[in-house]
Image (cartoon, grey):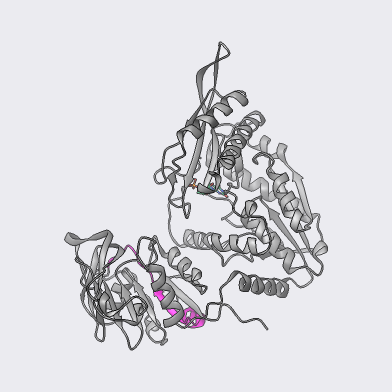
Amino acid sequence: MLEDIHHGRILILDFGSQTTQLIARRIRESHVYSEIHPYDMSETAIRAFNPKGIILSGGPESLTRETAPRPSRVIYELGCPILGICYGLQLLADQLGGAVQSIQHRREFGLAKLTLCTESELWRFLFSPSSKGSHPLTVWMSHGDQISELPPGFQVIAGTQNAPYAAIAEPSRHYYGLQFHPEVTHTEHGTDIIRHFVQTICQCQALWTPQHIIQMMKQDIRHKVGKEGVILGLSGGVDSAVTAALLHAALDQNKHLQLTCIFVDNGLLRAEEAEEVMERLAREHPIRIVRVNAHKRFLSALKGVVEPEIKRKIIGKIFYDVFEEEAAKHKDVQWLAQGTIYPDVIESASAKTKKAHVIKTHHNVGGLPKTIRLKLLEPLRELFKDEVRKIGLELGLPKSLVYRHPFPGPGLAVRILGEIDEEACKRLRKADAIFIEELKKANLYDTVSQAFAVLLPVKSVAVMGDARVYEPVLALRAVTTSDFMTAAFAKLPYAFLEHVANRITNEVEGISRVVYDISSKPPATIEWE
Ligand code: XMP
């Protein structure tokens, strides 16, 4: 019998901080399972979750306001440890009999020096008698309010110059509050503090490891699916490839009958993309893959369309039409598997509850048309991207596939600005392939998070072989990022860029010049459309 790896789990209540996801990631990196839920999770749901510990996230609101978000008081009745971070620390003061005040004139953003003043279970592993008052830790702060009165039973365990209540503790109940953010990498020992909290203070066992996760998922898939048929859309990306490998491993009794993968080739893929993915997946995992060539259907629907959001909608709609038609041919199928991962789940949950400004509609996040008759199987929906990659490697997928740069669902359609046609796709594909090939040759591919070429709807003059040409401009984009929410442009060497630009203008017909995009996100998004 398998140990239930969800058994010792941590509940994160989200008050809207930009770094809540990072808290969950740090806990997972400590091999403990955690879930993020909205701050107003009901009393019944909290009890049913049965956490071994609770973390209250940061958030943009102020507890000096009556209307500020507050969680159900049931969290104080469960008898489990609680860690409040930033706004979460202030909540402990607010709800347990202390007070919070606004400090508009002394707000703290960025790095601060933290002095430990009392020994505490929270940093027993850090503290030695000599650390009292010396060797301050560098921590990352971001707050405009602070505690003005400690709740009964609490003591101050660390302070900064601006925040005398930078860390507080109520040792008998294991309640802790940190004004700084341990989840961000700029905080020294931040990850250690979180690991110590979940493993030692909350006593969660370190069961959340790739091997355990795979075992659990395989068991879960077998239990759900039994002997029924499963269909999976392969996109060429990491998530669907790992889903395929996992299903293959789980359904090994009848794999050839049970699992069918459909690869919809929309004509908007990168050079050799379909072949590469299918060949690499098939090498280690003899999976039945049906390739549907739908170039013409996509390109004719996109004819004359220039607006990016309309391109996305058309591509999303045709994808589902093609997929459904193909799926209908497989009568013995009851399940539709999808490579949905945890950030997609959080993103679509928050899109439902918040009136977030839509910058781009990522069609793989929106879910399926209501008409689909199949049951949904999403084995990766509890995992972050880095966890998906580790599982992919553990399942035997090649590193080059698992660590591929992401590629958007609408493909080259959002990298050909303006109108799309076969000719533009060919040109862009060729230029993009040169850029990627050179990045790999120069050992730069793994140093950037995403790199690609963009074909602009702007023509410029060039002289080629004594003749004047007037052709489109091509932009190269390469970024580094850890989460794709923010990104910096990659500082690629000039000599490298020069070499790539030379190759592109020499080898790809119909490109007059090459430019390099030096914008960061925000404000510029990673893709141009
Ligand atoms: P942006 O351009 O929003 O991109 O900064 C962030 C990440 O998302 C990818 N992206 C998409 N992925 N469908 C997708 O599946 C889309 O419509 C889409 N638009 C952008 C982008 O490549 C980057 O990795």
Task: Place residue 221 in its image quadrant.
Answer: bottom right
Residue 51 highlighted magenta (yes or no): yes
Task: Place residue 432 in its image quadrant.
Answer: top right
- Tell me the magenta residue range: 44-62
Residue 337 placement (x, y as % from top left): 68, 61
Residue at the spot 60% in from the left edge and 34% down from the top edge: 434
**Residue farthest toward the left in the current orientation of the protein:** 105
Question: How many numbered discs?
Answer: 0
**Residue farthest toward the top in the current orientation of the protein:** 466
**Res 355 visible:** yes
From the viewer's side, name the closer residue of 347 and 427.
Answer: 427
Residue 245 placement (x, y as % from top left): 70, 61
Residue 60 highlighted magenta (yes or no): yes
From the viewer's side, name the closer residue of 289 and 346.
Answer: 289
**Res 40 visible:** no
Identify whether 133 is placed above or below 423: below
Residue 214 placement (x, y as % from top left): 65, 70
Residue at the spot 42% in from the left edge and 42% down from the top edge: 524
**Residue farthest toward the front in the current orientation of the protein:** 130
Identify whether 70 is placed above or below 455: below
Residue at the spot 62% in from the left edge and 30% down from the top edge: 427
Identify whether 72 is placed above or below 109: below
Q: Quadrant of the N terminus?
A: bottom right
Residue at the spot 44% in from the left edge and 74% down from the top edge: 195
Identify whether 504 is placed above or below 61: above
Residue 116 placement (x, y as % from top left): 26, 74
Task: Place residue 273 in its image quadrant.
Answer: top right
Q: Describe residue 168's horizontal placement relative to residue 368 as left or right.
A: left
